[in-house]
Each structure stands twice: as structure tokens, then as C-alpha cells.
Image (cartoon, rainbow, N blue to C red):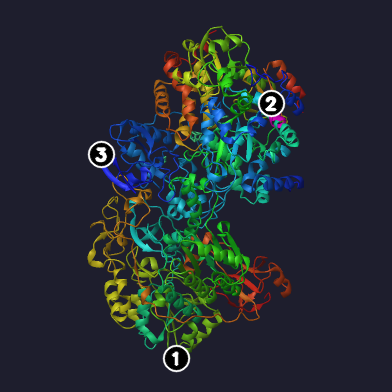
Amino acid sequence: MTTDLPLTGRARPDRVPHSLPEWRALGGYQAVERALALTPLQVLDTVDAAALNGRGGAGFPAARKWRFMPAAADAVSPGPNYLIVNGDEMEPGAFKDRFLLEALPHQLIEGTIIAGFATHATEAIVLIRDDYRAAIAGLTRAIAEAEAAGLLGDNILNTGYSLHIRVHPSAGRYIVGEETALIAALEGGRAMPRKRPPFPAQSGLWGRPTTVNNVETISHVPHILAHGAQWFRALSRTEEGGTKLYGLSGRVNRPGLIEAPMGTTARELIDRAGGVSGNGRLLCFQPGGGATGFLGPEALDVPMDFGHVAKAGSMLGTGTLIVLDETACPVEVTARHMAYYARESCGWCVPCREGLPWAARILHALEEGTARREDLQALHDIAREASPRGRSFCDLMGGAMGPLASLLSRFGDLVDDHLHGGCPRRRAP
Amino acid sequence: MTIKLKIDGREVTVEDGRDLLSIALEQGVDVPHFCWHAALGSVGACRMCAVKVAPGEGTPGKVEMACMTPASDGMVVDTTDAEAARFRAQVIEWLMLNHPHDCAVCEEGGACHLQDMVVATGHHDRRARGPKRTHRNQNLGPLLTHEMNRCIGCWRCLRFYRDHAGGRDFNAFGAHDRLYFGRAGDGPLDSPFAGNLAEVCPTGVFTDKAWSGVYARPWDLSATPAICTGCSAGCNVTLNERGGTLRRVLNRYHGAINGFFLCDRGRWSPWSVDGPGRLTGAVTLPRVAGAVGLGSPRASLESNWALRRLVGPGRFFAGVSDRETALTARMAALLKASPVPSLTEMAAADAILVLGEDLTATAPRAALALRQAVRGAERDLACKKGVALWLDDAVRVAGEGRRSPLALVTALPDALDDIASFAIRRAPHDMAAFAAAILAALQGRPADAEASAIAQALSTARAPLIIAGAGLGLAGPVEAAASLATALGPKARLALFPAEAGSFGLSLLAPAGGIEAALAELERNPGPLVVLENDLFRRADPALVERLFAKATQVIALDHLATETTTAAALAVPVAAPAEAAGTWVNHEGRAQRSFAFRPADPQAPTAWRVLAALAGETPEPGLDALLEALVADLPALAAVRDGAPGVDHGPVPRAHPRQSARTAGNHPDRATRTDPDSPLSWTMEGDRAPEPALATWTDRPGLHSVSAEYAAQQWIGGPLKGGDPGVNVLHAAADAPALADPPPGAGLLGLPLHSPFAAHEADAASPPLAARAPAARVTLHPADAARLGLTAGALLVIDGRPAPAPLSLDPDLPAGHIGLSGLRALRPVILGGAP
Amino acid sequence: MTLPADLETRIRHLVAHEGGPRAAMLETLRSVQAAEGWVSDERLAQVAAVLGVTPAELDGVASFYSLIFRRPVGRTVILLCDGASCGLNGADAIRDAIRDRLGIGYGQTTPDGRFTLINSACVGGCDRAPAAVVGPDRTLVGPLTPALLEELIGGAP
Ligand SMILES: Cc1cc2nc3c(=O)[nH]c(=O)nc-3n(C[C@H](O)[C@H](O)[C@H](O)COP(=O)(O)O)c2cc1C
Ligand code: SF4
Ligand code: FES
């Protein structure tokens, strides 16, 4: 099946997942057959050539990460390799993995087998946030079907490759999505991020070589194997391969998911979502969830891929846009984000644990009209001191600084206005 | 391989593979930090240690956390960089958002790492408004207070308590800015190392409850270097005093022994000095002639020698059983043959066998060392994966849970079982046989699977370690341990822990036997009996002690505690407690270390060796130096004890802190002496701090007032003290001793000692904080034995004619044929009477 | 209340399948909550004993995660999103409507034990803002309107 919507094209409108026979009728598991006939290195090279960047937020090339995974013969110590599929999706504004998990579980299983094969994994774990009950149930069912059909488990399709997939619900915490914290959670403990290096590929789950990939990243993989790297790259409008499952929410008329070529502009995406709601005029948008800085109308024609959005001063992140019209208040939006990130801090490092609640408190005071000028100075200081990479232990706080720093630089006057009696947009009739 | 880097313009050469923070601190560049701890490594939680780092000269720098950054060749580090300093100031402001401004009522105030760091970063204005977070505190038992509001979340407490010391009843709860460190509920902390929380916490969350009860400001305390007398490990402590009373006991770093951590027994047993159990009263000393003397394993070398001088070598006996006397002498003789591992070296062993010893109770600090040793395999694997060893958390993960082999052959479930690869239970008399099976396997003869596996682990190890001790009072495990060490060859180390802090010192004085021998001597040549610092009823069969007392023409007991022995004695002479007396203690390594009096002598309770001289009718020596001269003249083999510490003429070295709030604060009006006849230390602030670590009183330096700055006195972080770790080895003075065999167990019930880390000796029971922490006494039988004897739980037994210390409880873990007894010195047959 | 036998069986199964007691802690807590709605101190201690961990170890984990409830909750838990996308689409009005209708704010439970309201962001329903996740099956509902809210409240046990 060649389509320009490889990722979502087969999904049923009602989101009900396909049974295995239905999926196979749609060409399902052919990619697995094709991949397992190759060597792991060949699979890896194919994905490398396809320029698949991780869709979890950072955009790291998937194949480059896989290459760090040692084959059993090269491992420092004997034992399993793990592949972890990250379906925690707790980024504010993100709802794309939910769809892929709920509607297309077999696609994810296929991708997991292929990625597992390439990374010499013997066990794969899909971590799904607990609120996604339908996804958990559907994927669990699909795994059982695939196992029963010999497509998963021991000696897959008689190729000699074995992979078992487990589904693990998260007990709820945004930080569980951070890959090293996720590993800690899977070990049954508090989800606290771990120092990198050592990277998970070196010392991950239970100290074993581990790869963590996002649900969307993995869901792309079967299509690369089915149709080839060149085809995948050609789907994109930029150097980064494939389509992207974008999302639109906030002040748009038809919020939802849009699969489109990587590098599609925000203007097109917002148009396809029915345009800006509210007063109909775009104030700004966050390109990829809560942890990405605000961009203004001037960025509407920036190709939405990792590289271009970064150059424009924000981050593609999850690629799920939060749109604000001119009647929406970015201070309020940032206040909500900050309250959330403060609450979701794991508590390990000081900047995040102490700095975020303070920032959240000041933003709230701004909204309420109880903030003073020196509070604003403190807010600027927090943004300045915590924004550079490496100031906090993991990227949670750095991410949270995205909206805050861009709020302060982009909407300085509006923020100042809040010093005189709170949010002017709330004050306005 | 070494590398060169620049720190604040100064070029330094260091070993490759280290972190920037410890390098800077070692160089005397005090980069602010909280979560880093020399013994706990780097975890990068506090983000306080920010410095500017550039990969090379002329390349742009970036703010990095020094503790998480590996040093590399050519690196340029600027700790004074404005951007880094600004970030550090911001971190402090964040920390102070919720930290209460309660320094004025906080124990830690004045010696607080957080205070030091706040001052260092120049934070003085509070910008934040609104309420601070508050927590409910927990009652953590008699030893520590808990004030969670002061927590800055550096994670040191948890990393020490769980990761380093293996405690499992303490944790971090909650998340984000509602973190809570404590127990699941109120109650004393299980770990016998919990007291270290008071030192690892950089603020005042955990503080010493005993100190709080008699609180004085840290800068108003005098400090005296002393040796812990809680067990034979010989940990170094600092005794804090003000106004003539003990206020606090702190760890005193020793690179080869205790490092940064003490056990709770060590921290609180000195409190017996001001406890209600003191022996008091004015006595008129008689002249004593023709006496038999019973030396003590809890007396200093000097006091035991003074007794020996009083009674003569032929009438000088050890105040323990003949068997223990012989066993101690044998242990010293066995150790003489090979290098004895220090606790630090024990922590580096890669395969360990413990034969019969409940180490966590009998030499707790050694058990803590073993907890670090078993992490060796984890460190090795992490190393192979290229993980730097100072990244403590990363090492724990990369190590995949591997442990170096630790085999515990004990009679009862052991506190170290959780880290043991082999937790093997044998009845005391069967241990030697099990060890023999290991020996057989080592020599290639057939043996059972467990013994073979242990033999395999030991023989393939790089640095195997065999440990035994006097905890059961049996020779079997000790002899077997020595044979195994010999069989393993020169790479192996043998550690033998005698019963008490003074055991080896006493043994080196070659007592003519133990209590039974003393009784025989009295039967041959009657005379008075002088008992030195020893409740004999706790160290031997009470019936034997009663017979001994009956034989003596008079019993004179010297002690700082009122005990059953002093009550039974015709004359009970109060003497100084170990903490109040200068003296030498010979630890399990044979290391002779000098301890000093924390306060001027009380004329009502002079140091025992002075009293003994007076009993002999001599004019007591003017000071310790003279006594040591006489001792060495008598026993030239012990000449090295003089070098345990510098003599009086090295003074004055101030015990009082230069910051004392009044110039006379260190003195107490009721005592005239400002100088100490037994040491170069004075109770004033006059003089210079001594460069010799044996006389070290304070380790702080400008800007750093807390124990978190202990590293400053070390040659390298975690290494020996500048000037060398104190102590001199005197084990060569031990006499040869023949191999020992245990008498057959016999048919009756055998009393099995139930040791406790919190209640080893009478001083522990006399220390109010420790007594409050000590578990209840126990008397236990295997249910089958109880059934056979017609006894049920709760029965009130009579043991050896005395009421048992507790009602009977049943314990299926007890070996059959044994009765577990708290307070019992050594395994021995007991006679059971029914409920009275 | 003693630990129900089926729960104990389930815990032992988890220990065997998750790779030891430590790894099984989270799943165990979730099982308790699935059966009883929340994890009481008493249960926590019992479960810890079955697992062979200390209550401190288990609660260290339990108290970390926001969806392990350590206080009693109502029969129907409403996780109302207070995130940005929902906020931009009237989440606060829904919060106020719940307060008016049920008398509870965030973190509170109705006196009859029917409902607990918890703020949660984001629930992954930004395309259906304002959204909430409701009930034991964590059903996503949205866009929430006063009418839908009324229907929801009426249909809840
Ligand atoms: C605070 C935080 C939360 C994150 N949450 C998620 C998440 O929910 N899902 C996800 O896939 N990645 C998340 N990430 C990114 C992961 O750490 C990791 O980079 C990603 O799963 C790798 O997958 P990819 O390479 O396929 O993008 C998060 C990162 C941070 C710092
Ligand atoms: S930035 Fe620090 S406190 Fe925040 S989530 Fe990461 S490690 Fe935890
Ligand atoms: S000391 Fe470096 S981060 Fe805490």
C-alpha cells in the first residue's frame, strides 16, 4: 500500500482497532516478514537512510540511537537487550500517541518487532499512561493475537528471532515519559531520571542495553521497511523523513490530528483545522506541546520539522500545536503550563523542584493582579538561569522554560500590563 | 594516567577519570555543593556546584555541574566566573524559598553547611512572598530529632541510609516540592548507623537528640580527640564538651578505620559519663599488697598495665574467662603472622567469608565496611561499561545488581543476610566443620556444593577476606578462619575481632590467665582482689564470680559505673570513665591509638591508673608521658605506644574553639586546671591547632564550619589524613600462643549469646540515649526444644540460678539445643530452672 | 481487614512475573487500587509484607505517583483537565459548574462518597477540550458542556 498517509491511512474512523485478519488483509505484517529476512544491520541501515527522527520530542535520529545497541556477542555482560516503546504522552497539548495506540495497535507491534530486531532486543515493553485504558486493552489483545499467529513471541515466522512484548501501564507522572525515569518506573521504583551518560543503550533497564522510542517513531518503522527509505524520505518536504502526525488544539475551529508531510507549515495545518477560532486572528502558537516556546504569526510559514522550528526559536517537540487567538492570554496559558510542570517535577533537582513552583506562583499572581514588579524580576531571573541546557538534571525544567522564556521575550508588554490589576484580557468585556 | 587542567588559573595534575568537584576541593578551591559527599559520590541533584568549564584554553566555556563533569586534559575551569556564580546564587535563593529562617533556634546553627553556602553565595534578601511549605515531623526514637521543614532535598540522608548503610525503613516520599524524607510512620530508625544522618544532613533536619537535650552552640563546644571504646574496631571520635559536661559525640575522620561514619553505639555510648549509673562517693584508699588483679577488656592499656604493676605479672589476670583469655591471646598471635586489614581495606575485599561473627552487633563499623565491599562486583561491571565510579547512582544501575561474594556462616539470621551470596546457618559447634569443608574444597578434595562454591569464590578472588571473632567465644571458627586464610595464600587477609576495645591491649600485657586461673591463684595464695573497670558478672558465669569473690580476702573494684561487681565489692573506687581519661586502645588490627580526656579530671574519680598507683602506695605519675615511660621500660616490646600521639610538651593545643563566644567559655569555674597533665591539649583557646591528626580538635577552616567540610583535612578525598592516619601497630608484641580447641558441647542446653548493636557492654546500658534505643532483652528457645522441655512462650525461667532477663520467647531460627540469651558473653552450658 | 486471598494470589503472581518484589511494587499497588479504589495504610503494610519489602519502600513508590490514591476517593473519580488547551476552551467553567453542582473543588470528595474531583493535565484529549477522564475505566469525555456534565453525573454510580 503506497499512500501519502502511511501512518493513519488504514485507521478506521471509529478508532476501533483492526483484528489480526483485518490487519493482514490490509498488508499487515509484510514489513515484518521483509525485515526479518534481512540482517539487523541491514534493517538499521534502511531506517538510517530513511532519516527517521524520533517523534518523542527531541528529534534524535532513530537509527543512530539503535546503533549503540550491542549484539549479544559484543555485550559487556551477558543478558537481555530491551526495547521500550514510550506511550506515556503526558505533554500538555499532545494526543497523537493515544490515537496510534488505540486505533492501530498492530502497526505498533510490527514496528516494535522490526525495531527490536534491529536493536537485538529480546524483550519489548510498551509503557502506556494509565488513562489510556482503551489503548492498553486493545494493544494487549493485539499482542495475544499476534503471538497466537506466530507473528510475535518465540521464533517469529520461523526466522529464529524471538521477541516478547509486554504492556505496562504508568501509574501517572509526566516525568515517567522521560526515558531514564521511565526505566526507573519499569524497575518498579520512583520515576526519577538518571544521569546520561551512561546512555540507556549502555546501561538501561536493570543495567542492560536499552532503547527507548516514542510510539509514533516506532509506528513509522514498518512503512520504511515495506516501501523503502527513499519512499519515506520523499514523503517529507524537508531533509527529515516521513510524514508527521501533527495535532491542533486550543483556539482552532476543528481541533484534531493531521498526518501530513514532515515540514508542513503551521499555516496549512491551522487552515486544515478550520482556522483560528476566538476572534479568528492568530496571536501565537506553541509548535509542539507545552514545553515549546511560543511562535508568532511570522512563523506560520516555517516548515514544521525539528531543524526548522529550532531555527525559528522554538522546538517541534511533539508536533502538536497549541493555538492562541488574540483574545487568549499567553500569560494564562504559561501559568497553566508552569503549574503543571511544577506539580510534575520529580523533586530530584533544586532548580525544577523549587524554581518551577515559584514561577508558577508568580504567574498566578500576575493573572490575579497581585504580582509586584520585583516578582517579575524574579520571573525573569528564573527563566534566565534555568533555560540553558544542563542547568537542571533532566530536560523537564529546560522544557518548561520554553514557554516562560518566550512569554517574557515576546509578550513583555502584555506581561507588564498584568501588574496593573491582573489579566487585561480577563478584565476586558 | 594523569592529566593536566587549570582551576582558577592554577595548573593541577590529577589522575584521569575523576570529577571536577572533588579535584577542586582537594586543591583547596571550595566550590559550593550539597548533594555531593565524599563517601557517597556525585548525583547531580542540588545543582549548586556550577562552575565555568572550557574544554581547552581559548575555547568558550559553559556552566557545568562540577560534580558531574569528568576532568579532561587541558580543561580550563573557572569557579569564580560571573555566570556560574550567578547561577549558584540563584540555586541558593531557590533553596531558601522554603527553608525556615530558624537558625537562631536550630542546633545546626553556626556549624551548618547550608549557612556556609548561603554566606558563600552572598544571598541575603528574600524576594519571594507567600507562605513556606511545612511538614509534620516524625518521632524517630531516642537518638535523632526530625525537623523536616529544614530539608533542602539534597538526598544525602537517603543515599547514606539506604544505599550506603542498607537501611530499609527510611525513604523519600512524595514528589515535586512536597518531598518528604522519613519513615512510613513514627518510630526509631532500624539501622544501627542512623546517627550519621545528623552529620550527612547539611542542615538541621536530623540532629542528635542527646545534644539537643543539653544543647550548646557548636562554637562554644570544646573538642577532644578520642577513641571509641564500643568495640574493637577503634573508631575515632570527637567528644564535645561545655561547662564540664558532654554535649555531643562526632565522627572523627580516620582514613583507615571509620572514614566518615560511626555506628550509633560509638556515637552514644560515651554518654554513660553523665548518666545516672555513675559510681560516686568519696573513698579512702587503702594500701594494697599481695593482691590478685583482674584486668579489663574495657580498660585502657595504661590502666591494665598499672594494675599489672600493682599486683605483679604473676598475679595479673584478665577479668574474663580463661577460655576468652586464651582465645584473645591466640587471635593476637594469629594476626601477628600476616598483615591485618584495616576497615578501609576490608571494604575493598572482593570475596568475604564471615565465620560465626554477628558483625553488625559485635563490630558494627566493620559490617558497614562489608556493605561497601560487596559492591565491588557492581563497580567492576560499571567500570567495564565505562561508567565513572564517582557517579554513584549510575554505578548502581550499570552494575546490574551484581555483588561480590559474601558468605555468612552464622548461628542466627544475620543483619548482613540481605547482601550475602551465601547465608549459611550452622550451630556454633558445627561451624568449624563447615569451614573444614571449604578448606577441603580449596585443596581440591570433595566437599558439599555450598562449601565448594564458597571455596571457588575465595580462591578466584583478587583480595579474599576471612573474618571471625570472639562473638561466640569459640576457638573453632577462629582457628578455621586462620587455616583458610593460610590456605588462600598471601593475597588473603584475616581479620579477627576480639570481644572489646581493650581486649588486645589487655592481652598484650600477658595476663597469667583468666578468672578461673585467678581463682586458682587465690586458692593457692589468698589475698585481696582488685577488679579493674569490669562488671565480672557480665563477663563470666556468675557462679564462678561468686566463688572468686568468696575466695578473696577483700574485693576492691574500680569503675566509673555502679555495677553488680562494685556492689559486691568491699570497696568500690570511682574512677574516670574512658572518655574522661587519657589512654591507649589497641584495636583489632593491633593499632594502638591514643584517646584523651574530654574534661579535666574529677578529683573524686581520677583516672584508674592514678588510683592504682595510689593503691600501691606510690606517688601517682604526674602524667601519661611518665607512665608510658615506665610501661615501656617494663615492656620494651610495647615501645611504639609512646608514638600513639605527641607528648605533653607538644602543647598547648586548644580544645576550645577560637570562636568561643567568651574568652573564658571553655573553662568551667569549678575546675582549676586549664592544662591537661596527660596530653598537649588544653581547655583554653590558647595555642595553635596541632598538625598531628592524633591531636586534631577542629577540622573547619575559614568559611566552612560544618562537618561537611571534613574533606579539608584529608590528603585526598576519602584518603588518609594530612599528616597520616593516627595509630601505631603494636601487634608484634603479642606472645605466640598455641592452637586452641573447643571442649565438646556436652549434652545440656547451651547458652547462645544474642548480640545487639545497641547494647553490647555495661557502658551502653548506662548511656541514657542508648539504653532507650536498645531492644528488650530476649530469652529464646527453638519451639521443638521448648516443647521437649515443657516450656511455653512467656515462661519466666531461672538460668544458672538467676532469674532470666526476659520472659521466654520461641524462635524457630534458633539452633536446636541452644537457648538464646541477651547479655551472655560467650557460648557456654547453662542450667535451666523452671518458672520460679 | 485481612488481605483478600485473591489479591494475595495476584501479588505472588506479579512477583513471579515482574522480576522480583521490587519490580512488582507498582503493579501491586495498582491491583490494590483496582480492587478497592485506593490504597489504605493498612493495605499498604499488608501488601508490603507479602512482597517482602518495607512499608517505607512501598510507600516511597506509592506516594510518588499521582494515580495511586493514598486517600479514599469517591466511586467516580473525575480527572478534569486543567491544561492549556482545555483552559483555552473553558475548563475553568466546567470546574465551576462541578463546584456548583456537587459542591467539590479539586482534591475533594462529595460527602456521599460518589465523586472525587482531581485536576489533571493533560489527559490527552486536547481535541475534545474541555476534556475529562472519568470513572474506573477512565473514559475520556469531552468537549464537556453543562449538559454533558449533567448526563455524566446522573449516570454515575
Ligand atoms: C520531561 C520529559 C517528558 C517526556 N515525555 C515523553 C513522552 O511522554 N513520550 C515520549 O515518547 N517521549 C517523552 N520524552 C522524551 C523521551 O525522554 C525520549 O527522548 C523519547 O521517548 C525517545 O523517543 P524518540 O527518540 O523516538 O523520540 C520526554 C522527555 C522529557 C524530558
Ligand atoms: S529537572 Fe530535576 S526535578 Fe525536574 S523532573 Fe528533571 S530531575 Fe526531576
Ligand atoms: S554537588 Fe554537584 S549537583 Fe550537588
The C terminus of chain B lies in which quarter of the figure? bottom right
**Highlighted range, magenta:** A133-138
Q: Which residue is drawn at 37% across and 80% down?
A: B307
Label number found at residue A102 = 2
- Using the image as rendered, state which of residue A32 and residue B7 is in the foreground: A32
Q: What residue type is labelled 3?
A: Gly
Gap between marks 2 and 3, in whole Å? 59 Å
x, y percent for residue A16: 73, 23
Q: In this view, does A213 lie to the left or right of B231?
A: right
Circle 3 is placed at which residue position? B9
Q: How crowded is mark 3: few (under 14 residues within 10 Å), some or many (20 or more)?
A: few
Point out which mark residue A128 bears: none
- Nearer to us of marks 3 and 1 is 3
Reading the image, the residue beneath label 1 is B526
Real-space Cα separation, disc 3 to disc 1, in angstroms: 77 Å
Of helix, strand and loop, which mostly describes the magenta segment? helix
**Labelled pair 3, 1 in contact (Cβ < 8 Å):** no
| Whole-percent x, y for residue B632 in the image | 30, 77
Discs 2, 3 touching: Cβ within 8 Å: no
Chain letter for the residue marked with disc 3 in the picture: B
* Residue A249 on image: x %, y %: 59, 16
The verdict on residue A137 being magenta is yes
Image check: B661 left or right of B134?
left
